[in-house]
Image (cartoon, rainbow, N blue to C red):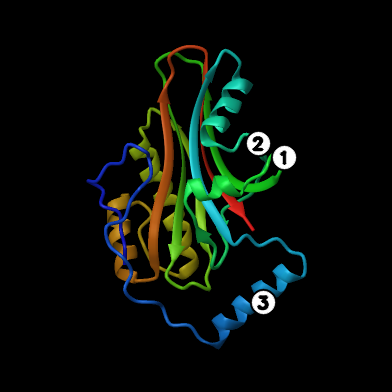
Amino acid sequence: MAWRDKNEKSTSGNSEWNKTVTEESPTGPAMESKSSDARAKSASGMIIPTRVFFTKGVGNHREELQSFELALRDAGIEKLNLVRVSSILPPGCRVISRNEGLREILPGMIAYCVMSTASSNEPHRLIAASIGCAVPADKNAYGYLSEHHGFGQTDEVAGDYAEDLAASMLASTLGIEFDEDKNWDEKKEVFRISDVIVKTSHTSQSTIISKHWSTVVAAAVFLD
């Protein structure tokens, strides 16, 4: 079981893990059948991503649209035709590094992503965007991605909120009983004990508006 140390802060806005999983959840014929079905659907033309990478960026410009473009450039995904999708992490979808993911993209390529954005031109306003991720221990089960944006929140605050959202959505589908009114640290302990959620993480970007428009983006970009 691996849980991020809340006291360990990362200037990049990405949560880290200081433990590794030592046990795998058991799988049976039913789980193997589901995995085979997914492969069959992929072969029949349905799009099921096999890899995902996380990225983030910030842009500033007198025009809001161009501040968004600059944020995409900072994230390294401005050359893509991005299609926003909802919150499911496919079974067996492998998380790769940002650098590895950016090497895979081509100008004009259509890419599916879960993206969070926030924009403002109010001076001194703090804005943040974050993507949370929750991965189940069962490799044949799907996980969750959550998008969150907010005002007056740092990378860490926005990231914890996004992680909480992703983990709570996954926990509810796995039948884990928990109190939704508890804070993230308390729920995280419940999820850890349940032994069915193997990892949660977040990628977050925040900025303080100086002048003109500022936009922050955080994204999970899917690849075949």
Q: Amino acid at mark 3?
A: Asp
Q: Secondary structure at mark 1?
A: loop
Mark 3 lies on residue: 37
Q: Horizontal and vertical percent for residue 114?
A: 57, 47
Specify few, some or many for label 1: CA neighbours under 10 Å numbering under 14, 14-19, or 20 or more: few
Q: Horizontal and vertical percent for residue 208?
A: 40, 21
Q: Residue furthest bottom?
A: 29
- Residue 84 in which image quadrant: top right
Q: Amino acid at mark 2?
A: Lys
- Mark 2 and mark 1: span between their CA atoms? 6 Å
Q: Dots 3 and 1: beta carbons under 8 Å?
A: no
Q: Secondary structure at mark 2?
A: loop
Specify few, some or many for label 3: CA neighbours under 10 Å numbering under 14, 14-19, or 20 or more: few
- Give the residue displayed 27% in from the left and 62% down from the top: 19
- Give the residue displayed 36% in from the left and 62% down from the top: 178
Observer-nearest of 108 and 155: 108
Mark 1 lies on residue: 108
Of the two numbered discs 2 and 1 on the same chain, state the one appearing first in sequence: 2
Q: Is residue 64 left or right of residue 45?
A: left
Q: Dots 2 and 1: beta carbons under 8 Å?
A: yes
Q: Is residue 204 left or right of residue 222?
A: left
Q: Is residue 59 left or right of residue 224?
A: left
On residue 188, the disc is: none
> Compared to 176, does 186 lie above or below?
above
- Give the residue displayed 44% in from the left and 50% down from the top: 165
